Amino acid sequence: MAIRTDGRPGFLKRRAPLPSVDSIPAPRTADRELPGAAAPADPPSGERLQDTREAHSVGDGFDDVPGIADLRHRTIVIDRLSPGDDGAIPDPTYTVNGQFQPEIDIQPGEIQRWRIANAEPDRAMWLHVEGHTLHQIGQDGFPFTLLRPVTSIMLSPGNRAEFLIRATRSGRYRVHAESYDQGHPGGARPAVELATMVVSGRPVVSRLPRQLDEGPQMPIGPVVRSRTLHFGRDTPGGKWAATRITVDGRELDADWFHHEVTAGTVEEWTLINDDVFQHPIHTHVNPFQVVDVQGIPAGDPSWQTDPDIWWDTYRIPSNGQLTIRMYFRPDVTGKTVYHCRILPHEDNGMIGTLLIQPPADTGEPLPGSSPPRQAPRESRSSRRALSISTATAGSDGST
């Protein structure tokens, strides 16, 4: 797995603050060595995490936004080391930028900008920083207009999040992922200690910004088509046979397209999960907004469901469904894919193929060939409310 820059929709005013995490073509991407696996067998532990303000160029993102431009910032990649044949590395061993449980230094009252990517191939990371609020400013590379204060952020494999954090009093605070049940038959994944935030030094006074930047808006226009897609697994050969992973009941066929769409149009897709796993679905090239989620387990606070947030990866609840609204940028046509971000599922065929046809030549400019105009405020506030339903999962993960 590697970090590289994805193409970004032309209607976005700014490039992605943190690039997409995508797999490198390989016989099985889940079997590749992961970042940090080439490090010493005993990964460095408890070391100071590097300040990435000068070490990493991030394009123009939030770099010129007052209140953010001068902050210390950190690019943080959560990953897992391969255990190796000699057993020198226990499995699983989770790392932060290739380090084992590093320390992140910050002064009392200081605000830092953290950009975090979950590069783990199959585990969601429910991120918490002990005793601190995370003031989120972006998701999957797309900026927010206003701060969103949260106590935690769920990172499915491939998700990226960007937030500001203001240190409180001096001390040591855990940076960790809480235990979470992704619908795996083996039960909830255990909690993971990722790093320690060390607050020390001279106190400083700093203020959180009130306004960020103008976030992207869905182009004004009709939804030209609605589609329903199914994601699932079965064992046609019986209980002990190999599992078949499918999209719309079909295994991957590179010479056949699940769907054809037209560039420059908006569609709504309803993604139905016929499985007990939560499948995080990733779309290449074109991001989306969440319109409806059904099947969120009762009492699960890990879901972000604001319809104004742009995503390129979002999980479908176990035996639930997700409706997304997607704008197909007019400047990119041809073949692309959408797929489950859990790499063993992707390796085994949970990949849908998509053909983006050129837009019709009407002589009229297409939305998205330049930054879209803002919808009137009353129009935005009256947009269809997000419908969220919850259900208590049964013992088999069904709802």
Image (tube, grey):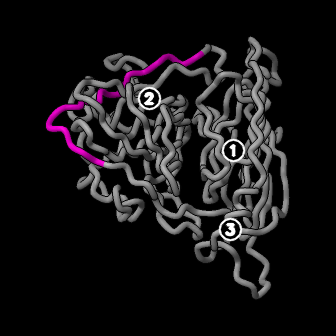
Q: Which residues are magenta?
A: 188-206
On-image quarter of the C terminus: top right
* Residue farthest bottom in this picture: 363
Amino acid type indicated by mark 2: His
Q: Earlier in the sequence, mark 1 or mark 3?
A: 1
Helix, strand or loop under label 2: strand
* Residue in the foreground of this view, choosing between 114 and 157: 114
Residue at image mark 2: 128
**Do the numbered discs 1 and 3 sit on residues whose CB atoms are within 8 Å?**
no
Percent across and percent down for residue 49 are: 25, 37
Residue 232 relative to residue 25: left or right: right
Percent across and percent down for residue 65 are: 38, 62
Q: Is residue 334 visible?
A: no
Residue at image mark 3: 375
Determine which quarter of the picture holds residue 200. top left
Amino acid type indicated by mark 1: Ile
* Residue in the foreground of this view, choosing between 320 and 299: 299
Asked if residue 291 is among those painted magenta in the image, a careful observer would answer no
